[in-house]
């Protein structure tokens, strides 16, 4: 069993990673990388099925047990199955005009029930959920932001410059500075651009260099079998 | 912003009921004022196709494939005249139009004497109220308000909307995964004949079996994919380790090369820049010098910033003395970067919030009209009347 659950998965990891690395260095093997990438996409699509199956399993149990909030689990199941049926069956979607006799030849996301679910349910719900973060970010900032030291002042000041520099208010606040004068660069809209182009660029570059080094070393550890945490407990 | 899950008291329930009733009453009143609210109009187009039979070209002795053409095209009309029993398929297509197009159509049709103008204004088909889209608009408005209700506290409307988003998004990504990945990458390769007949009629079939054999490699991801799903069966859960190992391995290999090439090397290359740069503004000598100073200072600050921040990230040496001082400058750069990121995040969220509020007030309530979707240009109506 150890061979099936440890040795073979480690071998697969190493080989798959090796193929991807080789495909970047040798032109002859570049197709291998593309094929492995396709394999990855297909398995990732199956992961969605796994996710859907898990969702069904958990919420069917909640409904059958009638545990607390089982009604909402029912809503999840109904919405999930409806979206799935409408989307996989392309219900109401127009066929491809070049092949009008093939019902499933049309675009999934441009017409029909699936488009409706996306346009009037999925999109407004997710957009509203993300938009609510504006309130929470503002609330958290109000509570947490205190100009206690120089670093905190820098963070707070930059956030204000960026926020004000991209609004009408920011333009008005420093409107008295002539844009063509020697101090034109101190206008908030100009300052915001300068902060983004210079300080933000430098900071982000260093962060990206750090991230890339971190990812490269983690990847090496995984491919060489040093890091086996993805195989579960015991390693 | 109290988001607790404690049960509501009787008075809180009463407040909720009053708030909901007031909103409903306001909406009803609004729908009766002026041109109303929350309606979606569409333009109808008849999509009919006729199948042209296969024909033989005597000159080249080539056989043309049967193909479909629009019945309103010249070729389609001629063919239908000659073959009235030809195979015809059709459906109605609906394209969303601004409400003002409908208002113009109504204003024009009210005056029978302007019949010719009506035809011109109506476009390819009549404009009508779309019930599915109108219902969708109201559903979207309900969900938007339901999510916003969480700002007060957790409540059944929010929980319902939350459940809907979980169910719909799970189904959405599964459907996208099937049509965008499984069909073109797996079914098309393993069974091109089936795929061509039912899903992708435009695809080319393998000419010979020799062309088809390489496609059988794709049995590997199919098997690995099925093994991944075995995770749902408790006793066979270990099967999923193999596809998981493949996913981790390919991602590790891909990311390692990609990040070194795309981020590590390219960022270093982009940071090796001249410390003296001539400015772009050359209107006056003073402006030229000033512009050069700013451009050079920008490059110097970038180089210093990258080096200082990297020193801060270097933890193998104790941050003392020169290293400590440099690392401190790095922290300042990082603070500015985080401040900018925070500012952008807040702006992005506020833009989303503005978009949702615009949806409620413009698309649903018809209280504002920034895109002039409903405002009829008086002169145009005057011409019609």
Image (tube, coloured by chain):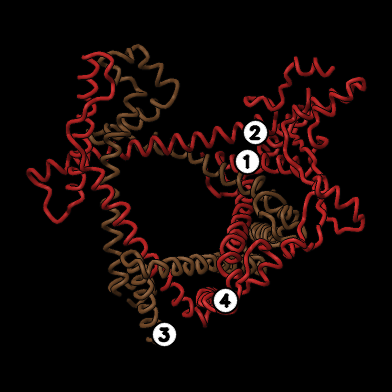
Q: Which residue is mark 2?
A: B360
Residue B52 place in picture, x, y as percent: 81, 57
Q: Which one is in front in this view, the residue at disc 3 or the one at disc 1?
A: 3
Q: Quadrant of the N terminus of chain A?
A: bottom left
> What hue represents chain B?
red
Q: Nearer the viewer, mark 3 or mark 4?
A: 4
Tag 3 near tag 1, CB within 8 Å: no
Real-space CA distance between mark 2 and mark 3, rounded to the nearest whole angstrom: 56 Å
Q: Are marks 2 and 1 in contact (CB under 8 Å)?
A: yes
Image spot of residue B157 (x, y percent): 65, 46
**Which mark identifies residue B144?**
1
Residues indicated by labels 2 and 3 sit on the same polypeptide chain: no
- Which quarter of the figure has residue B252? bottom left
- Compare residues A138 and A197 and report the one nearer the observer: A197
Label of residue A4 in the image: 3
- The answer to whether mark 2 and mark 4 are in CB contact below 8 A is no
Q: Which chain is brown?
A: A
From this view, report whether residue A210 is shown above or below residue B210. above
Whether discs 3 and 4 lie on one chain: the answer is no
Q: Residues within 10 Å of mark 3 (few under 14, many from 20)?
A: few
Disc 3 to disc 1, how far (Cα)?
Answer: 49 Å
Q: Residue at x 24, y 28 (%)?
A: B295
Q: Secondary structure at mark 3?
A: helix
Q: Which of disc 1 and disc 2 is earlier in sequence?
A: 1
Where is residue B167 shown, x and y percent of the image?
62, 57
Mark 4 or mark 1, earlier in chain = 1
**Element type at mark 1:** helix
N-terminal of the two: label 2 or label 4? Answer: 4
């Amino acid at each position: 069993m150890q061979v099936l659950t440890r040795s073979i998965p480690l071998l697969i990891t190493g080989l798959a990673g090796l193929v991807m690395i080789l495909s970047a260095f040798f032109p002859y093997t570049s197709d291998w990388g593309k094929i492995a990438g396709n394999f990855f996409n297909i398995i990732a699509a199956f992961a969605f099925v796994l996710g859907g199956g898990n969702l069904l399993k958990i919420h069917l149990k909640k409904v059958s047990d009638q545990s607390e909030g089982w009604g909402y689990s029912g809503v999840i199941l109904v919405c999930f199955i409806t979206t799935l049926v409408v989307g996989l069956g392309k219900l109401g979607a127009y066929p491809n005009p070049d092949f009008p006799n093939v019902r499933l030849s049309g675009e999934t996301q441009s017409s029909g029930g699936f488009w409706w679910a996306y346009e009037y349910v999925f999109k407004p719900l997710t957009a509203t959920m993300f938009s609510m973060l504006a309130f929470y970010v503002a609330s958290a900032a109000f509570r947490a932001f205190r100009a206690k030291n120089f670093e905190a002042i820098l963070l707070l000041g930059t956030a204000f410059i960026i926020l004000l520099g991209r609004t009408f208010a920011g333009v008005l606040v420093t409107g008295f500075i002539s844009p063509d004068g020697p101090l034109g660069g101190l206008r908030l809209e100009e300052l915001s651009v300068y902060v983004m182009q210079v300080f933000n660029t430098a900071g982000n570059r260093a962060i990206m260099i750090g991230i890339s080094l971190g990812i490269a070393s983690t990847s090496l550890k995984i491919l060489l079998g040093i890091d086996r945490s993805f195989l579960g407990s015991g390693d | 912003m109290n988001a607790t899950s404690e049960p509501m008291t009787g008075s809180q329930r009463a407040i909720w009921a009053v708030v909901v009733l007031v909103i409903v009453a306001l909406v009803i009143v609004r729908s009766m004022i002026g041109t109303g609210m929350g309606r979606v109009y569409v333009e109808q187009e008849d999509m009919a196709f006729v199948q042209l039979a296969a024909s033989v070209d005597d000159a080249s002795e080539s056989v043309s494939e049967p193909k479909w053409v629009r019945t309103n095209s010249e070729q389609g009309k001629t063919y239908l005249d000659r073959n009235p029993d030809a195979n015809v398929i059709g459906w109605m297509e609906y394209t969303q139009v601004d409400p003002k197009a409908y208002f113009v159509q109504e204003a024009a049709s009210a005056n029978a004497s302007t019949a010719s103008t009506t035809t011109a204004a109506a476009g390819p088909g009549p404009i009508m109220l779309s019930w599915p889209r109108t219902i969708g608009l109201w559903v979207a408005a309900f969900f938007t308000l339901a999510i916003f209700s969480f700002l007060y506290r957790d409540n059944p409307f929010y929980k319902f909307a939350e459940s809907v988003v979980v169910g719909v998004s799970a189904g959405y990504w599964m459907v996208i995964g099937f049509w965008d990945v499984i069909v073109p990458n797996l079914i098309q390769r393993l069974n091109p004949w089936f795929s061509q007949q039912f899903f992708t009629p435009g695809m080319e079939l393998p000419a010979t079996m020799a062309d088809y054999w390489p496609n059988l490699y794709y049995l590997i991801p199919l098997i690995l994919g099925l093994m991944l799903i075995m995770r749902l069966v408790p006793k066979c859960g270990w099967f999923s380790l193999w596809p998981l190992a493949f996913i981790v391995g390919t991602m590790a290999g891909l990311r390692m090369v990609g990040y070194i090439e795309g981020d590590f090397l390219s960022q270093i290359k982009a940071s090796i820049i001249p410390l003296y740069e001539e400015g772009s503004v050359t209107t006056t000598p003073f402006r030229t010098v000033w512009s050069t100073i700013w451009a050079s200072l920008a490059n110097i600050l970038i180089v210093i910033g990258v080096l200082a921040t990297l020193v801060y990230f270097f933890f193998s040496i104790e941050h003392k003395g020169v290293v400590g001082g440099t690392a401190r400058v790095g922290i300042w750069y990082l603070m500015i970067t985080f401040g900018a990121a925070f500012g952008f995040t807040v702006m992005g969220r506020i833009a989303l919030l503005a978009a949702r509020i615009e949806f409620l007030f413009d698309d649903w309530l018809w209280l504002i009209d920034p895109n002039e979707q409903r405002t009829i240009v008086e002169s145009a109506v005057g011409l019609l009347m």
